[in-house]
Image (spheres, rainbow, N blue to C red):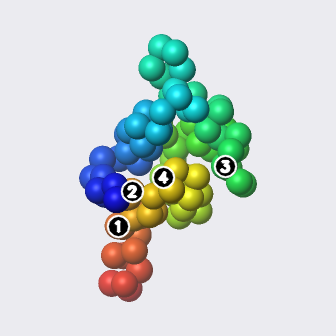
Amino acid sequence: MVEPSDKPFGDALRELLLADGDIYVSAGGNVKWATFAHVLHGVSYDILRRTVRGERPPSVELMEECARVLQVWPTYFAEYRAIGFARRAA
């Protein structure tokens, strides 16, 4: 079981991808974002790129899809947990 991250979505996702191994990491140790975006259903590379950079907030759907591909609970992401808390408080 992977412990939830308190880091911003982009940083948390980067850590997961780097830990996942060779599929999404270049020989130089950088995340291959286009390769990862290709396996996400309903998510374009541009949306992923802008979200990882912090230019737009991560959607629930994006976090759930990233979690599905990486086989972690969506609650790994702090923003997902925050949305859940906000919904319960409303």
Measuring from the top left, give residue 13's x and y in whole percent. 44, 44
Give the secondary structure at mark 4.
loop
Q: Is residue 43 above or below residue 52?
A: below
Residue holding disc 4 = 57
Comparing labels 1 and 4, the label whose residue is closer to the camera: 1
Chain-order first, disc 1 or disc 4 = 4
C-alpha gap between disc 3 and disc 2: 17 Å
Residue 28 visible in image:
yes
Under circle 2, the secondary element is: loop
Depth order, front residue of 86/12? 12
**Residue located at (45% from left, 20% from top):** 29
Q: Which is closer to the viewer, label 4 or label 2?
A: 2
Alpha-carbon neighbours of circle 4 within 10 Å: few (<14), some, or many (≥20)?
some
Q: Is disc 2 surrounded by few (<14), some (14 to 19) or many (20+) residues within 10 Å? A: many
Query: Upstream in the sequence, badge 4 or badge 3?
Result: 3
* Residue at the spot of label 3: 40
Name the secondary structure under disc 1: helix
Residue 43's place in the image compared with 68, above or below, is above
Mark before the other along the chain sequence, 4 or 2: 4
Label 2 sits on what residue type? Phe
Q: Residues within 10 Å of mark 3 (few under 14, many from 20)?
A: some
Between 12 and 70, which is closer to the camera in this rendering?
70
At label 1, counting other C-alpha atoms closer than 10 Å, the crowd grade (few under 14, some 14-19, many 20 or more) is few
How far is the residue under mark 4 from the one under mark 2? 12 Å
Check disc 1 and give the amino acid type: Ala
* 1 vs 3, front mark: 3
Q: Are marks 3 and 2 in contact (CB under 8 Å)?
A: no
Give the residue pinned by disc 1.
82
Quadrant of the snapshot with the C terminus: bottom left
Which residue is found at the position 34% from the left and 55% from the top? 2
